[in-house]
Amino acid sequence: MALRREDAWVAVASLGATPETAVTKRTTMLVIGDGFTGNCVEEFHTGKAAKAVHWQAKGHTIEVLTEGDFFGMLEEKASSGTRHS
């Protein structure tokens, strides 16, 4: 990712989410770096994407975001938290 992992974790935590190192049944979102391409989680060839597919097959909802989606979400959350006079 263009953002250091530590900085991404801080940004996620500041929004109230709990970043984790592994994909588990508690996972609700997975960010896939732009170095990987595909249209669905099954097409991303990473260990974490494979785990996401596993948990999705068991009925868990895991949203998969591209790096661009992730940055867009952070920007949207930051701008929605800004007060205008």
Image (cartoon, rainbow, N blue to C red):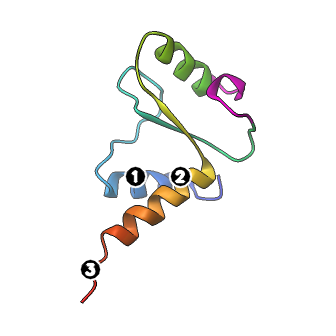
Is the residue marked by circle 2 packed among few (<14), some (14-19), or many (20+) residues within 10 Å? some
Q: Residue at x 56, y 18 (%)?
A: 53
Between marks 1 and 2 in the image, the one whose residue lies nearer the viewer? 2
Q: Amino acid at mark 2?
A: Phe
How far across and down, in percent of the image, does residue 82 sit? 31, 76
The quadrant in which residue 11 appears is bottom left
What's the residue type where badge 1 is placed? Val
Q: Which residues are magenta?
A: 38-47
Residue at (40% x, 56% y) in the render: 10
Using the numbered discs, state the Cα–Cα distance from disc 3 to disc 1 in whole angstroms.
20 Å
Q: Nearer the viewer, residue 32 or 42?
A: 42
Quadrant position of residue 66: top right
Q: Main secondary structure of the magenta part?
A: loop
Q: Earlier in the sequence, mark 1 or mark 2?
A: 1
The residue under label 3 is which amino acid type?
Arg
> For the view shown, which residue lies furthest in the bottom direction?
85
Q: Which residue is mark 2?
A: 70
Q: Alpha-carbon neighbours of circle 3 within 10 Å: few (<14), some, or many (≥20)?
A: few
SS at badge 2: helix
Q: Is residue 37 left or right of residue 84?
A: right
**Residue 70, how many percent across, how many down?**
53, 52
Residue located at (34% from left, 68% from top): 80
Find residue 12 and name its label.
1
**Structural distance between the alpha carbons of marks 1 and 2:** 10 Å
Using residue 8 as the reference point, say whether residue 45 is left or right of it: right
Q: 67 and 84: which one is in front?
A: 84
Where is mark 3, residue-wise?
A: 83
Of the two numbered discs 3 and 1 on the same chain, state the one appearing first in sequence.
1
Q: Secondary structure at mark 3?
A: loop
